[in-house]
Amino acid sequence: MTKSISFRGLLGLGIAALLSSSVLANDGLSLEEANTIVKEDLASTQVMAEVCPAIIGKNAKFDQNIQLLIQAYLQDYSDKSMTFDKIQADSEYKAVLNEARQAAKETSQDEQKSVCDDVVNYQA
């Protein structure tokens, strides 16, 4: 399923996929594989939303950028009616989210802060 990669790696892959808008469409991925990538991106974003406020404090720009990332990732999901709330019930998403949470726990505080700062400075 998912390889164990760092919290920063999850974010980096997610933002890179977001910046190249047609990655999923042109990569020859199956629908299931593309949806799994979206779930991984959403899970890393959710973990950032959980972890970063304790590191950088309350930040409106961070909150805004998290919402932008969530909406951008959901656009690549095969079921266009899928919402962030609905995906929370998906068993695969729950597993990916647990993996992302574990990766965040294994990441240094400095690296977490760097990821959080990346989200604050993200330009859509």
Image (cartoon, helix red, strand yellow):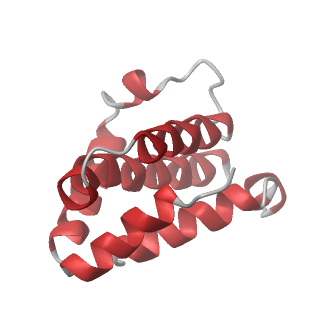
| 61 relative to 34 in the view: left or right | left
Q: Is residue 41 left or right of residue 107?
A: right
Expressed as whole percent of the image width and height from the top left, the position of residue 57 reads: 24, 51
Look at the image and tell me whether residue 38 can be seen: yes
Where does the image place residue 54, in percent across and percent down from the top left?
Answer: 17, 54
The residue furthest top is: 81
**Quarter containing the N terminus:** bottom left
Q: Is residue 51 left or right of residue 69?
A: left
Q: Quadrant of residue 121?
A: bottom right
Q: Report the number of discs.
A: 0
Image height of 122 relative to 64, above or below: below
Position of 67 relative to 100 (above/below): above
Q: Residue at x 29, y 38 (%)?
A: 91
Residue 12, percent from left and from top: 53, 71
Residue shown at 33% from the left, 54% from the top: 48
Q: Nearer the viewer, residue 34 or 5?
A: 5
- Image quadrant assignment for residue 74: top right
Horizontal placement of 45 versus 18: left or right? left
Q: Nearer the viewer, residue 85 or 69?
A: 69
Image point (23%, 67%), residue name: 104
